[in-house]
Structures are given as C-alpha cells and as structure tokens.
Image (cartoon, rainbow, N blue to C red):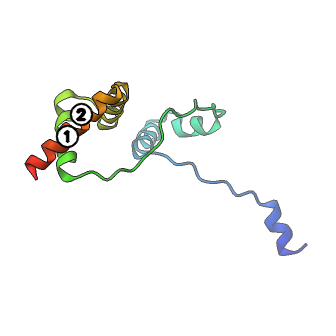
Amino acid sequence: MSLTDLKRKQQKQKPKTVSIEDFIEDAVNYAVGKPSRIEKAVNQPKRKSPPRKFRHATFSLSEASIRQLDDVAQSTGIAKSRLLRMFIHYYCDLTDEEQQALLTQVEGDAAKKG
C-alpha cells in the first residue's frame, strides 16, 4: 500500500463554524451536565435555505451622504440598506419628468453648498 492510497481513503471534514456565543453557552451546558447544543446542530439534517432576496453590494458615498444616511437611520430606526431600497423604489415610481425635476433640484442644492 502506497501513501497515495492512504490519502484517498481519508475524508477531510471541514470543522463546523461556531459563534462565540454558542461556544460559551455550550461550555456552560457541559459544565452543568446538559447535552451539547452544537453536537445536536451538527447531527441535524441540513435544511435548504430559501433563495436570497438580496445581494451584497458595495457603493462609494461621500462623507456627507454617509452622515445623512446615518442620521435618517437613527431617527427612523430603519436599517440603512432598507432605507436605500426605499429611496430607489420611490425614485423608480416617479415619472420621467418628476425624476428629472428631482435630479435638477439635487444638483442645484449641491451647487449651492459646494
């Protein structure tokens, strides 16, 4: 038997990623004699997750825009990503003329501040 035969028979198992909170809670369970939650999670069959509704995206925003978005998010309690989706939806619901008027207004406001 060669070394390559040994390699083929070994099955590498990727260690399960566990959050710090789960690890600590499992250690507490172990200390008091309760069963492990992590082992239960590993042994349970995996469920198919529903298709993702959102995709991660990266945008470049000015410091002023980031501050304004932070302020709106804090005052409304709405997540920044949800706010951006709402703003985009609102803009797309406008007519072409309304979109152009809004863009002209925003560019005019930026020129006054700049």
Q: State the image coordinates of residue 108 (x, y, percent, origin top left).
A: 15, 43
Q: Which residue is drawn at 59% across and 53% down?
A: 15
Alpha carbon distance from label 1 to label 2: 6 Å
With respect to residue 71, does 113 lie above or below? below
> Do the CB atoms of the residues marked 1 and 2 lie less than 8 Å apart?
yes
Amino acid type, label 1: Val
Q: In this view, does 111 lie to the left or right of 11?
A: left
Q: State the image coordinates of residue 33 (x, y, percent, origin top left).
A: 48, 35
Alpha-carbon neighbours of circle 1 within 10 Å: few (<14), some, or many (≥20)?
Answer: few
Instruction: Find residue 67 and report its image quarter.
Output: top left
- Dot 2: element: helix
Q: Which residue is drawn at 58% across and 29% down?
A: 50
Count of numbered marks = 2
Amino acid type, label 2: Leu
Give the residue at mark 1.
106
Give the residue at mark 2.
102
Q: Residue at x 22, y 52 (%)?
A: 62
Instruction: Find residue 10 and report its image quarter.
Output: bottom right
Q: State the image coordinates of residue 46 (x, y, percent, origin top left).
A: 64, 34
Q: Is residue 30 left or right of residue 70?
A: right
